[in-house]
Image (tube, grey):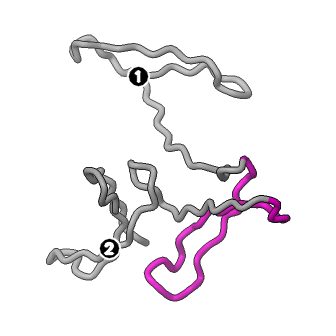
Amino acid sequence: SLIGIPGERVANFREFIVFNSDQIFVEYLVAYKRVRTYCNCGIKCIERTVVKQNENNGRKIHFCGQVEREKECTFIQMLPLCNCGESACVKTSTTRNSKDKKFYSCCNRRGGRCDFFEWKE
């Protein structure tokens, strides 16, 4: 668990490791998910929405914000991101209750897949 000290930037934190779950009392919980806003060259990303009529229609996409292409930056990231930090894949449900409904899921083929799941609206 983590306790942040509020301010302009949270630079200090304390971490507690508890070995017995009976010793934990949750007073409140703050959860957030980081979204990358800078590309590999350190410039703020530009966010656009996919308009092409395909399975990615309506998805947000981040890419390098360089106006002048002084150096080659190939950063591109389609949202949402799975728990592995990679762009999630669009898949189609085959279950009886939600047949043909689209959803996002992890598409990590190299290692084990994470449990990311989100319905596409």
Say left or right for 20 vs 120: left
Q: Quadrant of the N terminus?
A: top left
The residue carrying mark 2 is 91
Gap between marks 2 and 1 measured at Cα: 33 Å
Instruction: Look at the image and say whether residue 72 sits in the magenta stretch.
Output: no
Q: Nearer the viewer, residue 39 or 30?
A: 39
Q: Residues within 10 Å of mark 2 (few under 14, many from 20)?
A: some
The number of numbered discs placed on residues in the rendered structure image is: 2
Q: What amino acid is found at the position of numbered circle 2 in the picture?
A: Lys
> Residue shown at 51%/19% (left/top)?
3
**Residue ranking furthest to the left:** 96
Above/below status of 86 relative to 69:
above
Q: Nearer the viewer, residue 11 or 76?
A: 76
User: Which portion, as a residue range, is magenta?
Assistant: 42-70
Instruction: Look at the image and say whether residue 51 sits in the magenta stretch.
Output: yes
The tag earlier along the polypeptide, 2 or 1, is 1
Q: Nearer the viewer, residue 10 or 61?
A: 61
**Residue ranking furthest to the right:** 68
Q: Are marks 2 and 1 in contact (CB under 8 Å)?
A: no
Q: Which mark is residue 1?
A: 1
> Residue shown at 62%/60% (left/top)?
75
Residue 43 x/y as whole percent: 75, 51
